[in-house]
Amino acid sequence: MNQYGFIKVCAASIYGKLADIDYNCVEIINISKKAADDGCSAIVFPELSITSYSCQDLFHTQNLQKAAICGLQKIRRETRDLPIVIIAGLPLAKDNCLYNCAAVLCKGKILGIVPKSFLPNYHEFYEHRWFTPAHFDCPHTVTIEKEEIPFGTGLVFQNEDSPLFSFGVEICEDLWVPIPPSCKMAESGALMIFNLSASDITIAKRDYRYRLIQMQSARLYSAYVYSNASAAESTTDMVFDGGCFIFENGECLAQTENLSVGQTIAAYGEIDLEKLQAERLQNNNMRTSKNADNCKISFRLESNDFSMQRVMPRHPFIPTDKNMLSHRCEEILSIQSTALARRLETLHYPKAVIGLSGGLDSTLALIVTLRAVKSLGLSPDKIILPITMPGFGTTQMTFDAVKELCGVLGFSGLREIDIKDISLKMFDMINHNRQDYNVTYENVQARARTYVLMSTANKENGIVIGTGDLSEIALGWSTYNGDHMSMYNVNCGVPKTLIQFLIHYEALKPGNEHIKETLQKIVDFPISPELLPPSADGNEISQKTEEKIGPYELHDFFLYYFVRFGFTPEKILHLASAAFNGKYSSDEIKKWLVIFIKRFFSNQWKRDCVPAGPKVGSVDLSPRGSWRMSCESAVKNFLSQLE
């Protein structure tokens, strides 16, 4: 928690007994002990968990009310040595009213009592018969055995030792209203919301409830920890499923199975509070409430150690669900092609001049351009002008791949313009040794290609379609005023790892069987700018980008967490070591992370003047909006953590 901002929490649904307070409290105590042993720092139980939700008119009996208070005190005593916050539900009388409440306990102390704001009194629910809705925030107090306890709907609890460990509590129906109390709690600084619920299960309701929790978590940039009453409740008119959910900014970290009989069930999740804070800091509409301090309840709790079980995806830009991946690929291609179509429309349908190398980036750019032109109802052969420009590093296999790709896509006008002569002439003009394969040797060729493309675009009344991807822009892996430049770059928002999936998706689409083999061949090629001479037979690529700067899957991982959330290099190293455990050692990851940070900082000057192109995802490096950074920024403080 203190080092990386993670906290482990639990949502537990006890299989209790109606009106059997002793039994229910023992269950709450035992599960809390287990959760604490597992490293949890907070646990939430269902609505009215101390008494059970289905007690009906028994809530009006003094016996049940007093027993509930005694049960609360028992939980308090039995858990005073546990390093965990416990949130349980009970009925509580105050000022001639009975409230449906959540009690928040920590280390033998009742930190506060939160009453339910909104009571359902429709269809199968009848809560107004027993309880009074709470329409006040704070500060108020309630007396429990001569002790004044904070009492209010807007309480926010914050750990003094770890300020990010801050949370609010709402109860069941509170979530279902137009403006839930958790909205104010989030404005007051709560990064987590715990919900004690008793929501019956009916056809499709679980799915609706899932989406409701998901969207509230996303709307508040918060974690949402939800515990529902179990099937142990009365089934006279309703059935409860014991569903428990843990969400983090719209992402489901954990959930329990539906309708479990005879046992207590629980969901465990590890929440990244630094990630949530980063989201809020970037959104300037997430303003802090003026009355935030009035409702703040401070407590002290040492961080509970746990072994992280949270699965860190290796490719954060790529959904793990196959159906979602297909949907995402189609969405990205649509964004790219729509943006280009609008640009072509604005310029009165110029030629789309595109340089093809047989690699991933130019292949994707051609696919996007083809889509854009078709969406405008134009003939691709009349609008798209593909050009291949073999140089000293071009291999026979990539050269053949370009011709094959254009053939299967139906382009008859592929132009071949060799750049060797113009490059040799430039070597001589600047007095460069033709056998010196240094950066000058490479960049002369890169600029020669751009010179050919730009000049052709002028001659044909066209625009040059850029192919450089987001990963290359981040690393500065381009030749300034060479492949760095174009007139519109359709790939600028797409990272390298995602490009492979986009091309693979296009290859598998129904109706594209004729291009499947060609596209798969291109995906399998090593990533290379092909600027250095190949093997003697001309078929082996000698210049492999990832051998020089490191695996793109690592750089895309670094890029995502550095730009998206502003994580420290130390935390990124920690997350990458967990994600790539078994594939790369921590030393390898650290080596490439240092290179990423150095290159990211030292190449901002290239990003300051990149051409326009569509933003595709949440990570983008356009200097006109998404990422603004001075090229004089010092990198020392960022590297010092890794040293």
Image: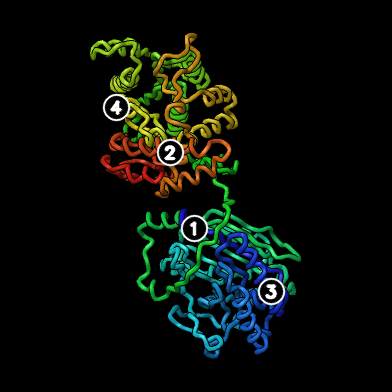
- The label on residue 379 is none
The residue carrying pointer 2 sits among few (fewer than 14), some (14 to 19) or many (20 or more) residues within 10 Å by Cα, namely many
Please name the amino acid that badge 4 sits on. Answer: Asn
Residue 276 vs residue 481, the one in the foreground = 276
- The label on residue 593 is 2
Please name the amino acid that badge 2 sits on. Answer: Leu
Q: Which residue is mark 1?
A: 1
Q: Quadrant of residue 352?
A: top left
Please name the amino acid that badge 3 sits on. Answer: Val
In the image, is 580 to the left or to the right of 438? right
In the image, is 114 to the left or to the right of 607? right
Residue at (69, 71) in percent of width and height? 27
Q: Which residue is mark 4?
A: 481
Q: CA distance from mark 3 to mark 1?
A: 29 Å
In this view of the protein, can residue 606 be seen by the observer?
Answer: yes
Q: CA distance from mark 1 to mark 2?
A: 23 Å
Residue 289 lies, in percent from the top left, at 37, 69
In this view of the protein, can residue 374 be seen by the observer?
Answer: no
Residue 219 lies, in percent from the top left, at 46, 59
> At numbered mark 2, what does the secondary structure look like: helix, strand or loop?
helix
- Lower sequence index among marks 1 and 2: 1
Residue 53 lies, in percent from the top left, at 66, 76
- Lower sequence index among marks 3 and 1: 1
Q: Which residue is mark 3?
A: 26
- Lower sequence index among marks 3 and 4: 3
